[in-house]
Image (spheres, rainbow, N blue to C red):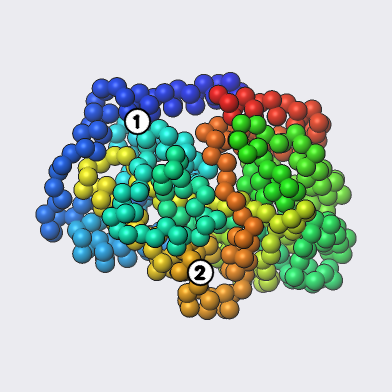
Amino acid sequence: MNSKVKRSMKALLIVAILALSITGCANASSLTANANSSEPAKASGTPTEITFWYAWTDKIQQNNIDLTEEFNNTVGKEKDIHVTAEYQGTYDDVHQKLQAAYIAGNAPNVEVMEIASMKTFAMNDVILPLDSYVKQSNVDLKDFQEGLMKNSYYNDACYGLPYLRSTPILYMNTTLLEAAGLDPKGPSTWAELAEYVNTVHEKTGKYGISVNSYIWTFEAFMLEHGSSVLDASETSTNMNSNEAKEIIQFFKELGDKKSAHLISSGESDKVKTDIMNQDTALWFSSTGDLTNVLQIAKDNGFKVQTAFIPKAKSYGVPTGGCNLVITNSGTDAEKQAAWEFVNWMTSKEQTIKASQNTGYLPSRVSAKDSDAMNALYKEIPQYKVALDQLSYSTGRPMNPGYAEASKDIVDALDAIWINNADVDSTLGALEKSINTILNE
């Protein structure tokens, strides 16, 4: 599908959402009536039923199921609330289904929302500002780690609370590093990264690193080089800059030597295959993958350590993961029930449990400094790397066109890294395309 068609579809979807909020169609009337109703809470013993949509499987899915069940058996039972947790796929899947469900008038009450998408849904009134609920429950927003709150606001209102949050980190198969005679602490600079990658390949015949075309890690690479994917105003891109070309050429040269395994976005599962087969020593991924990676290492007989993404001019990473949001649908009683659930899920105790279960960052300062987390860091120091790296973090772009722009960037990386497309002409065309998208 070409960019013009994609942009037309996106525009139609936004118009449909806005029309639903403004016109007098049946579904919109129903939503408005529910949102403004003074319907009393259900009688004791008849629970208010709400739905929670989440993304991802494995340890993350189990964490969501377990915490939802715990809520239902404790606070839910006390306050006559029952939450049904429903898996919806990837973040993109969740967002697309929410758009469709909102238009149809059957949106979930609570949802995980990838942080770069917060502005799009907030500006179209699909999700609710939480300030009145925060005030009602005396929630101290300053207890959420500062680096994790940057994508929570739109027009100075808070629309989401940090839930399963992360940064990209460097993972290392230290068994392979040691076989290549390398320090298992890993590389700290990009020069050392190249040395590690080439040495592993020369000494073991394995890939030194497996890298797939992935916008989030590329955001980190740009920050490390003193730049960013978008400018500060989020109206133009830096993807045709010297910094971007340097990064792209760095990995291309390693790929040409067969020291690096460059993998297209559509075949990103090959990174996991390389990891499981011990065919790669290094890879970049979310701290939220940590529990799964540790299990893979245990099952396949190798050791894993984590480290900061090596620095170029400086360290720097985007935060990622999801916030919990409340949708602009349902009765007042359902919205209040949704808040009770969101408030509980993002509290200190649940933050600790979620971090222990998945490897995601503890989003609250009080959780980060707790005895339970300090004990975990002592037992499994790999967990602490992302927390320390958070000092060098920033948020993600929230221009409504960034999702589409990101796909174009990934396509360009695929073209250069996998199909040997010309760097200058590919990035020149990419720059024009992205700048058009960002300003529509």
Identify the residue at horizontal 60%, vertical 35% (top origin). Answer: 234
Q: Secondary structure at mark 2?
A: helix
Q: Which image quarter holds the N terminus? A: top right
Q: Is residue 289 left or right of residue 99?
A: right
Residue 247, how many percent across, how many down?
Answer: 78, 45
What residue is pinned by disc 2?
368
Residue 124 versus residue 395 in the image, above or below: above
Q: Which mark is residue 103?
A: 1
Tell me whether circle 1 and circle 2 mark residues in contact (CB < 8 Å): no
Closer to us: 57 or 196: 196
Q: Is residue 273 visible?
A: no
Q: Residue at x 32, y 54 (%)?
A: 135
Mark 1 closeness class: few <14, some 14–19, many ≥20 residues within 10 Å: many
Q: What percent of the width, then of the height, locates residue 201?
A: 84, 59
Q: Which of these two is toward me, 123 or 407?
A: 123
Q: Earlier in the sequence, mark 1 or mark 2?
A: 1
For discs 1 and 2, the disc positioned in front in the rendered view: 2
**Residue kind at label 2, given as amino acid type:** Lys
User: Considering the image in quadrants, where does the C terminus appear?
Assistant: top right
Position of residue 138 measured from the top left corner of the image (x, y, whole percent)? 32, 59
Q: Residue at x 52, y 57 (%)?
A: 146
Q: CA distance from mark 1 to mark 2?
A: 39 Å
- In the image, what residue type sits under mark 1? Ile
